[in-house]
Amino acid sequence: MATRMGIEITEWNRDRLVGTMPVAGNRQPFGLLHGGASAVLAETLGSYAAVMHVAPERIAVGTELSCTHHRAVRTGRVTGVATPLHVGGSVATFEIVISDEAGRRVCTARLTCMLRQRPPGERAAR
């Protein structure tokens, strides 16, 4: 899905994961960035960030996503920054702030992931 949406990861470490997504191709019928596209960006970034804390032995599975949409975007790219709020033994929660090219907050999201053992015999995603 990340490829289909045009999501590109631009920075990653254990404290911060950054990605961008074009508005073009991810708009709703009124020409605005679709709220669902913001949700996909948020869950993608938060999930990747969670996996960075537990891979390769474990996986992260999203269990709750909440998004508050603050302003509309019609053109350009949006940038999401995922930062950990809590990373424990079985649960991780991340805040994902999505901004437009002018640095204005477009969406604030929170993703909670369950951290699970990788199923026996399953290989890591590429």
Image: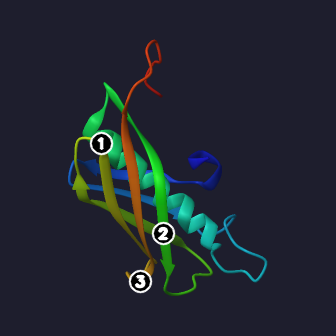
Q: Amino acid type of disc 3?
A: Ala
Q: Badge 2 is on which residue?
A: 66
Residue 114 or residue 101, whichever sits in front:
114
Q: Position of 109 compared to 88: left or right?
A: right
Q: Nearer the viewer, mark 3 or mark 2?
A: 2
Alpha carbon separation for disc pair 2 and 1: 20 Å
Q: Residue at x 66, y 68 (%)?
A: 24
Contact between labelled residues 1 and 3, with CB atoms less than 8 Å apart: no
Alpha carbon separation for disc pair 3 and 1: 37 Å
Q: Residue at x 61, y 73 (%)?
A: 35
Corner quadrant of residue 80 = bottom left
Q: Position of 59 compared to 53: left or right?
A: right
The picture places residue 47, in percent across and down from the top left corner, at 42, 48
Disc 2, SS: strand
Q: Dot 3: within a 10 Å radius of its alpha carbon, few (fewer than 14), some, or many (20 or more) residues?
A: few
The picture places residue 21, in percent across and down from the top left corner, at 53, 61
Q: Residue at x 32, y 57 (%)?
A: 93
Disc 3, SS: loop
The picture places residue 51, in percent across and down from the top left corner, at 35, 40
Q: Badge 1 is on which residue?
A: 90
Q: Position of 34 compared to 90: left or right?
A: right
Mark 2 and mark 1 lie on one chain; the one further toward the N terminus is 2
The numbered disc on residue 102 is 3
Alpha carbon separation for disc pair 3 and 2: 24 Å
Q: Amino acid type of disc 2?
A: Ser
